[in-house]
Amino acid sequence: MDKIKKYVRKNALAVGLIIISSAAIIIGALIYAKTPPAMILFYSDTCPHCQNVAAYVEANGIKAKIKFEEKEVSNNQANATLMERKARLCKIDTAQGLGVPFFFDGQTCYMGDEPIIEYFQAHK
């Protein structure tokens, strides 16, 4: 027992750092676990179906009720690649390409203006 006390006294800083680091990791994991997955609406500026979704979102104040990111894909390759990754998570075959509007709610993918608007209607 005396050896343990001597060790702790001698290495108090290291032990303190280990305890603080462990606590920070646990707290970070808890915060991450409670953070909802990012919702993303992928669109193109020239897409008429995307404009239908945008008009519905605006007319119904959806952005104040549902938090989601919007990413334009026709002029941004990184956004297009991200959309493809989300589609693969939903087991969607991307070999023939993907269309927009495309909405990812963190678990499920919705393609087309009607399914996306129906999602917003059900979750507002």
Image (cartoon, rainbow, N blue to C red):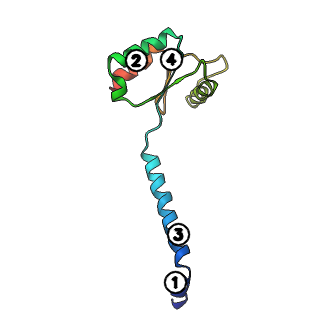
Q: Amino acid at mark 3?
A: Leu
**Which badge, 4 or 1, comes first in the chain's sequence?**
1
**Residue contact at pointers 2 and 3, CB within 8 angstroms:** no
* Residue 23 in the image: above or below residue 66: below
Where does label 2 land, which residue? 117
Q: Secondary structure at mark 3?
A: helix
Residue 101's tag is 4
Q: Viewer-nearest of labels 2 and 3?
A: 3
Q: Answer few, some or many: residues within 10 Å of disc 3's Cα (few below 14, many 20 plus, some between 14 and 19).
A: few
Q: CA distance from mark 3 to mark 4?
A: 49 Å
Residue at the bottom extreme, as displayed: 2
* Residue 34 in the image: above or below residue 19: above
Q: Position of residue 83 (x, y in %)?
A: 57, 26
Where does label 3 land, which residue? 17
Q: Amino acid at mark 4?
A: Pro
Dividing the picture into quadrants, the one containing residue 35 is top left
Residue 9's tag is 1
Q: Viewer-nearest of labels 2 and 1?
A: 1
Q: Amino acid at mark 1?
A: Arg
Q: CA distance from mark 1 to mark 3?
A: 14 Å
Q: Is residue 97 left or right of residue 58?
A: right
